């Protein structure tokens, strides 16, 4: 429980300091979707849960460092993804994209204990 709370605190602080939605328009692209809006992150030993606004149809794409995460559940307000086994403790960049496009990306940093 303490590990999860510390992880959430670290993730929340990292999110507040580092979350950076990137618009396709900044790169000359065209997209009617806004970047995913991540409002909270909970990390436990085997999965990550994101709460926020995730527009569009299809499953969002999550990339943690160099690992593409397997999304087990997703809705317009929550995404749950499995963490890779044997993930070493570190700070990782998490990219959140809409399905089938990289036009709008949200980027944040997470501390994995």
Image (tube, grey):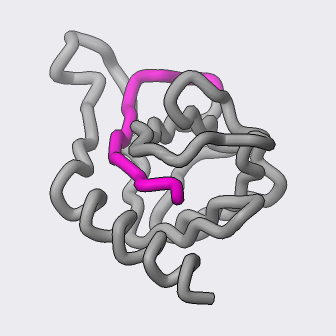
Q: Which residues are magenta?
A: 100-113
Numbered disc total: 0
Q: Position of residue 43 (x, y in %)?
A: 58, 66
Q: Position of residue 86 (x, y in %)?
A: 75, 41
Please give the name of the residue rendered at 45% of the width and 44% of the height, measured from the top-left corner. Answer: 90
Q: Quadrant of the N terminus?
A: bottom right
The single residue placed furthest to the bottom in the displayed view is 1
Q: Position of residue 14 (x, y in %)?
A: 27, 58
Q: Is residue 18 left or right of residue 51?
A: left
| In magenta stretch: residue 76 | no
Q: Position of residue 80 (x, y in %)?
A: 70, 60
- Work out whether 53 lies above or below 21: below
Q: Nearer the viewer, residue 98 or 112?
A: 112
Can you tell which quarter of the image residue 20 is in? top left
- Work out whether 63 lies above or below 103: below
Please give the name of the residue rendered at 66% of the width and 69% of the height, measured from the top-left corner. Answer: 44
Residue 69 visible? The answer is yes
Can you tell which quarter of the image residue 6 is in? bottom left
Q: Is residue 7 left or right of residue 27?
A: right
């Amino acid at each position: 429980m303490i590990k999860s709370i510390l992880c959430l605190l670290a993730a929340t602080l990292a999110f507040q300091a580092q979350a950076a939605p990137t618009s396709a328009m900044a790169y000359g692209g065209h997209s009617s979707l806004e970047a995913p809006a991540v409002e909270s992150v909970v990390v436990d030993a085997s999965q990550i849960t994101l709460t926020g606004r995730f527009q569009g149809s299809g499953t969002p794409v999550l990339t943690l460092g160099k690992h593409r995460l397997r999304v087990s559940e997703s809705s317009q307000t929550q995404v749950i993804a499995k963490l890779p086994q044997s993930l070493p403790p570190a700070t990782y960049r998490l990219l959140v994209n809409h399905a089938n496009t990289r036009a709008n990306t949200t980027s944040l940093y997470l501390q994995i204990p």
